[in-house]
Image (cartoon, grey):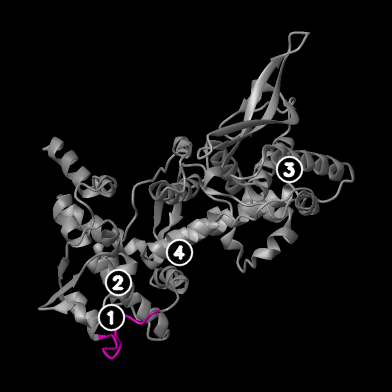
Amino acid sequence: MKVTVKLKTYTKKDKTAVGKLFVRVRNAKEKSDSLIYTGIEVNPDYWDGSLPGYNLDVPSEVMTKTDIIHFNDKLKRLIHCVQENCNDKTPKEDIERTIEVFMKASAELKEKKWRKTQQTRDIVDEVKKSVKASKVKPMPTLIDYFKKYLDENHFNSWHHQALTSVMHKLERYEAWIGFITEMDDWHLYPSDMNLEEMKRYYEYISHESEYRDDYPEFFKQFNIARDYDIRPLSKNALSVGIQRLKMFLNWCVEKGYLNDLSFRRFEDGGTVYGIPYYLTIEERDYLMDFDFSDFPRLQLHRDKFVFQCLIGCRCDDLDHLTWDNINDDFIEFIPHKNLMNNRTEIVRFPITDKMRTILERQDSSLSTLFFHYCPEIYRKDIKEILRRAGITRMVTVLDAKTRKGVQRPICDIAASHLARRTFVANLYNKVKDPNLISSLTGHVDDSKAFARYRVITDDTKKGLIDAMED
C-alpha cells in the first residue's frame, strides 16, 4: 500500500484557482487506486508536489515559515496516520473514516490550543477507537539508518567522530523541528531528505548557536558539556558538514532506503582554502632540541609532533603505529584513509637519524610508538609547545567567516595537521614531484591538495630578481 497526497486544481466562479488535497491510496497487488478528499484547500501557485506541501520560498506576506512548517508537518502526520492504521486489506470506507477522524480531531484540538504533542496522541487514540486497523511495525527513522551507516562502515576514529557529529546535529535538528511545531514525536525519515529539507537543515545549522543562546532550556536535554560543540560555523565548516551528510544520503540511495535524489542539487557554496602555513626546517629542528624537561607531557607531545613532521603521516595513522611497523630501518603501514577507498598500497618510509633519535626517547615497553593522550589535549599542547619555544611568527590565513586574509601567530592556530603540512611543504620545495611525495604521504596521485603547496618561495623570487639585475 502506497499513501501519497494528490492536488487537484479547480477554477472558482470568480476565475481564481484553488487546490484541493486528496489522499491517494494505491495497492499494486489488488490493482486498486483510491482518492479520498481531505477537506484541505491550498494555493496551487505555491504548491510543491515533491514535498508534498509548501516550500520555504513562499513569500512571507502569503504564508510565514512557521505556518509552512506547521502545515507540511500536518500533512506528514496525516500520511503517517493512514499508513499506521490501514493496510492492503483495509476497505476504502475505513480509510475514509481514518482520514475523517484525523481531520476532525486535529481541528478540534487546535481550537483548544493544546500542545501538538498531546494533539497527536489524542488523534491516534481517537482513530484507533473509531477504525479497526492492523498495527504496522514502526518505520526506521533517518537517525536509525545513520547509526547503521556508522556500524557497517569501518571508518577511522577521526572520520567516525566527524560523522557522529553530523548525526548529533541531525538529532538536534529533528528535536528542534518538533519543538517549534510543538510535536515531540516528530521524526525524520530518509524519504524526507529532499532539496527543501536540505535547505531547512542548512538554515538550522547556520544559526544553531543563536538558537542555543535564545533557548538554553531546550538544548539542556542534549547534555552538551562544552560550548565548542555548538558554535558559529564558518562557511567551510558548513560545507564540509553538508558533504558528509550527502555521503550518508548517497549510502542510503545505494542501499535502497532513499529514492529522491533532489538532495544532490543542494548547493552550499563549497570550500575555500588559503595557502598552507607550515614550520620551516629550521623551526622544526629548533623545536626538536628545545628543553621541555620541566613538563614531561609537553616533552612527549613535542616528540610526537616533530616525528609527525618528519614522517608526514596523518595523526590517526601515527597513533596506530607500533614497534612491529618498523622493518629493516623502514616504517611500513597502510594509511587507513586509503583502506577506506579500497587502496592497499603500503607506505614504506625510511627511518632518518632524527626519527631514530626521537624513537630512542620513547618507552619501548608500550605497544605503540607514542603514549596516547586525549586528542584534544594533544592539539592544545601543540599550541603551547610552539609558544614556549618562541615560534610565534605571524602567518597569513584565510578568515573562515569573511574569507579574507588575516594575520595570526602560528602558535595560536597550530594543530596536529600542521605536522603533515610541514612535511609536504618542505619536501615539495625540494622536489616538486607530487607523485613521488605521495608515495611517502599516502596521497592519491595528482591530489588536489598539492596544488595549494605550489607556492613560489621568497628565495626563488629573490633569485629571479637578482637574475634580472645581472
> Is the Cβ of the residue at disc 2 closer than 8 Å to that at disc 1?
yes
The residue mark sitting in front, 4 or 1, is: 4
Q: Specify the quadrant that holds the C terminus.
A: top left
Of mark 1 and mark 3, the one earlier in the sequence is 3
Of mark 4 and mark 1, the one earlier in the sequence is 4
Q: Which amino acid does label 1 sit on?
A: Leu
Q: Is residue 340 above or below residue 402?
A: below
Q: What stretch is highlighted in magenta?
A: 361-372
Query: Of helix, strand and loop, which mostly describes the magenta segment?
Result: loop
Q: Name the residue under label 3.
A: 98
Residue 405 visible within the image: yes
The residue mark sitting in front, 2 or 3, is: 3
Of mark 3 and mark 4, the one earlier in the sequence is 3
Mark number displayed over residue 369? 1
Of mark 2 and mark 3, the one earlier in the sequence is 3
The residues tagged by marks 2 and 3 sit, at their Cα atoms, a distance apart of 60 Å
Mark number displayed over residue 318? 2
Q: What residue type is labelled 3?
A: Thr
Q: Specify the quadrant that holds the N terminus.
A: top right
The residues tagged by marks 2 and 1 sit, at their Cα atoms, a distance apart of 8 Å
Whether the magenta-drawn stretch holds residue 364 is answered as yes
Q: Name the residue under label 4.
A: 161
Q: Is residue 399 left or right of residue 196?
A: left
Q: Is residue 76 left or right of residue 397?
A: right
> Is the Cβ of the residue at disc 3 closer than 8 Å to that at disc 4?
no
How packed is label 4: few (under 14 Cα within 10 Å), some, or many (20 or more)? Answer: few
Q: Give SS at disc 1.
A: loop
Q: Which of 190 and 381 is in front in this view?
A: 190
Q: Which amino acid does label 4 sit on?
A: Gln
Residue 55 visible within the image: no
Q: Give SS at disc 2.
A: helix
